[in-house]
Each structure stands twice: as structure tokens, then as C-alpha cells.
Amino acid sequence: MIDFKELLKEHGIPPSLQRIKILEYLHNFKTHPTADMIYQALVDEMPTLSKTTVYNTLKAFAEKGVIVELSLFENEVRYEYNTTPHIHFKCIKCGKIYDISKTFKCLKDEKIEGHKVSEHHINLKGICKSCLENAKG
Amino acid sequence: MIDFKELLKEHGIPPSLQRIKILEYLHNFKTHPTADMIYQALVDEMPTLSKTTVYNTLKAFAEKGVIVELSLFENEVRYEYNTTPHIHFKCIKCGKIYDISKTFKCLKDEKIEGHKVSEHHINLKGICKSCLENAKG
DNA sequence: TACATATTTGTTATCGTTACAAATAAGGAA
DNA sequence: TTCCTTATTTGTAACGATAACAAATATGTA
Ligand SMILES: [Mn+2]
Ligand SMILES: [Mn+2]
Ligand SMILES: [Zn+2]
Ligand SMILES: [Zn+2]
């Protein structure tokens, strides 16, 4: 059981109720949600929740390194709790985003052709295993 | 000297004046421009050019494989003439996008963990060689 | 040249995101 | 606990990129 209140404090973020709920959601649902998906999921439980809060909170979390911001495809910003670099696969049929467990040599903090790398993303796109099986059946 | 008119015909796209100019621009300027950048660059020469035409044309070109659509960072769609897979580096200081010549094993048309890959993108972010040198000086 | 069809244009709509100021909540001192 | 100061949240309005649409124009062909 993770103490999200403490975790936020450790990152220098005062833990408001909204911040705790948003972080909790990202921890519980590994779906790489957009800001709007998180808002939709939480607004029932927190009827006064504002979208602005969700957007601001996610930006702040990403800046402090509590979560990671992803630019995958279709120009959509997505967020995830898992901050260790890994490969992503997006299905063009069902839209689901998968984590790929195959590791890769991350260039973070290294130099390539003279440029200093601070982020290294590998994004795949195609048809996922589940959609392939459904098509066969 | 490439015959862009012929090139478009070969891809099944009737070559209008606008289409030829847009393709020509992407061939001449390897800056990975956005739709708006292309519009701004061409509107002086073609005063009646419409943004809608630029957006539609780029989408059509990408669908037919004449050019490539890139989703790098900051949620911006960019386009380029070079359709062979390669690594991209975006500088957080000057905003420039560099092609990295280091090759990689592209997973296109292969399967990974059961998922069939149709696109494989590697995106780097950091401070470019030129900005590093400027900072030192 | 004239016609039928495809393309382009300009306007308006939409979507995700941000700016801003007023309302509210949180944490520390008394 | 109560009060006070400050940070956070809220709601609305603005924004920028893109798409939808119908009218105007250009294109290729006969
Ligand atoms: Mn992930
Ligand atoms: Mn490139
Ligand atoms: Zn799928
Ligand atoms: Zn730079």
C-alpha cells in the first residue's frame, strides 16, 4: 500500500485531495490515460473537479518526475505512473496502448552525433495480438 | 531534377499546382515543417492558397506514402519527404529537428510480443550540438 | 471550346489545452 | 480551535491546430 501523500511530499508537491486522487488513479490504471480520461473517471466521485486542475496537476507531476508524459501518435498527450523507460505499442484497431517488456539501450544522458539526449522514446504502431486473434476467429 | 508532377501521378494523385508546390517545398526544405509552416512559406507566392488545402494535401500524401507524417513531441504533427525510417532528435532549446544517421533494426512488418508492427519510431529529445557549443562560448 | 468532375477556397465548427481571476481549501501561529 | 496568510482549485473564456462544409474554381477530356 503506497502512501501517495508521502510520495508527493518527497517530490516537493503539497498533497491536496485532488492531487492524491489523480496520482492514485494513474497508479491503479496502467492504461496510459489522457488528461480528459482521468477527468471523466474522477468527476463522479469528485463532482466539483475541474479539468484545469487535472491538466495543471499532470503537468506539475511530470515536471517533478512523479509521472511521465508521453507523446505517442495522433497528437495526444498521455500520462503514466511507470517512470522507467520502456517501449510502447499502440493498436490502430482498438486504440489500446501496450507496454513492451523487451528492453533497449536507452541513450538518456548520453551523446549521439554531438547532441545531448535527455529523453529517448520508442513508439510502435500496428495491430495488437488481441485484435489479430479476433480477426482470425 | 525530380519531376514532381510525374511522381504524384505514379502515386495515383492528380497533380494540381498546389500539390506540386507543397511536395516541392518538402523536398527542398528538410526541416520537418508543420502544416502551418508550409502554408506560411507558400502563401506569398500563392496568395489564394488555403490552409485547408495544405492540411488535406499533406494527409493525402501521407496516406499514399508520398511523404511521412511524424508525431514527435509537444503534440505537433510534422511532415517530411524522406520516407525511409530513421531516428529523430528534437532540441529543446532551438526547436530544430535533426535526422540521426545511426541506423536501427526497424520492426516494421514484424511481430513483437504478438503484436504486428506497421510503424516504428525512435524519438530523441535534448540539447543539440550547436546549442551546446553556443552555451560554452 | 464545353462539360463533367475533382480540387480549392473561405468560413465556421470542434477539440484539446491554457490563461485568468474569483472562490475555496490548507497549513501554521496564537 | 480559531484566525490568518498563502496555495490551490474552480469556472469561464480564450486560444491554436485541425476538420467539416458548401460554394467557387480549376482540371482533364471529348
Ligand atoms: Mn508505459
Ligand atoms: Mn527526418
Ligand atoms: Zn487492438
Ligand atoms: Zn538546439
Image (cartoon, coloured by chain):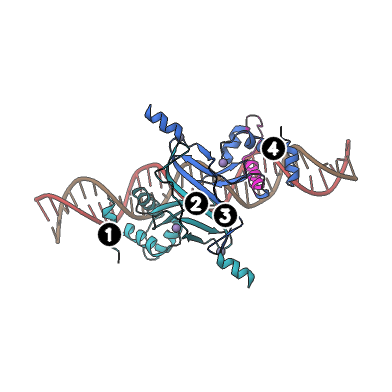
Chain colours: A cyan, B blue, C red, D brown
Residue visible at 47% across and 59% down?
Answer: A102
User: Which label is found at residue A5?
Assistant: 1
Q: Position of residue B73 (x, y in %)?
A: 48, 46
Residue B51 lies within the magenta run: yes
Numbered disc 3: what chain? B
Q: Position of residue A15 (x, y in %)?
A: 28, 56
Q: Which chain is mark 4 on?
A: B
**Highlighted magenta segment, given as a residue range:** B42-62
The chain ID associated with circle 2 is A
Q: Earlier in the sequence, mark 3 or mark 4?
A: 4
Mark 4: amino acid: Gln
Residue B42, can we see it? yes
Q: Which mark is residue B18?
A: 4
Q: In this image, A56 relative to B108: left or right?
A: left
| Residue nearest the observer in this picture, A17 or C22 | A17
Residue beneath disc 3: B107
